[in-house]
Amino acid sequence: MRLFVALEVTEEVRERIREVMPDLRKHCPGARWVRPEGIHVTLKFIGQVEAAQAEAIQEALRTIGSDQPVEMQFQGWGFFPNQRRPRVLWCGVQASPNLAKLAADIENALEALAIPKQSQRFVPHLTLARIEEGKVRRDGIDQLVNAVNGLETASFGLTQQRQFHLYQSLTKPSGAEYRRLESFPFLKGTA
């Protein structure tokens, strides 16, 4: 099974993003656009594991805690790796400092299970589209970049989270679907 750890996004944030996606999609229809109901903040991509290892992962995740909830504001847009060669369109996440610590604690707990740490620095974001080279015309990418630059200061809401989730990613012809396997309250003193 293919697993990842993530924070949920409120329906209010999803709805605000859902409102602007059609305008962005028309500039770059060849991109693979995510379904708004699947948007999440990835804390750790684990990848393919056996069922027995999934149980050990769940046990390790139950040990993660924080003194405060994670606060997030969804604002701004950008591209990975950059605007000249975009592969991913994302919505930015400004978060309380404990979000980075939460992600690091998850990395450390899973590294003890021989799950490698991510090589890139943790950058919280919401993936909105994937742009595959050769499948999207350059003028479409340029139009998308211009449209996104016009939304740089748009805010899509705030949220406060007290739990993270382990998901299984299921690949289907209609796109990826996510099944929540377990939720982990991380705020110390909650269950």
Image (cartoon, grey):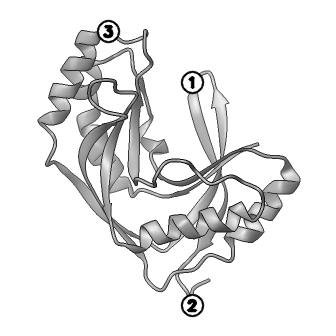
Secondary structure at numbered mark 2: loop
- Left or right, residue 180 beside residue 83: right
Residue that badge 1 annotates: 174
Secondary structure at numbered mark 3: loop
Closer to the camera, 62 or 159? 62
Q: Which circle's residue, 1 or 3, is located before the other in the chain?
A: 3
Secondary structure at numbered mark 1: loop
Q: The N terminus appears in which quarter of the rendering?
A: top right
Q: Looking at the picture, which amino acid does disc 3 mark? A: Arg
- Left or right, residue 26 beside residue 62: left
Q: Looking at the picture, which amino acid does disc 1 mark? A: Ser
**Which residue is at a point 16% across and 28% down the rendered structure image?**
147
**Which residue is at a point 13% across and 48% down the rendered structure image?**
153
**Which residue is at a point 27% across and 24% down the rendered structure image?**
84
Give percent across and percent down for residue 70.
Answer: 41, 72
Tell me the mark number nearer the camera, choosing from 3 and 2.
3
Q: Which circle's residue, 3 or 2, is located before the other in the chain?
A: 3
Residue that badge 3 annotates: 137
Residue that badge 2 annotates: 189
Q: Which mark is residue 108?
A: none
**Which residue is at a point 62% across and 21% down the rendered structure image?**
173
Q: Looking at the picture, which amino acid does disc 2 mark? A: Gly
Q: Which circle's residue, 2 or 1, is located before the other in the chain?
A: 1
Asked if residue 144 is positioned above or below residue 40 in the image, the reply reads above
Give percent across and percent down for residue 181.
Answer: 69, 56
In space, the residues marked 2 and 1 are separated at their CA atoms by 41 Å
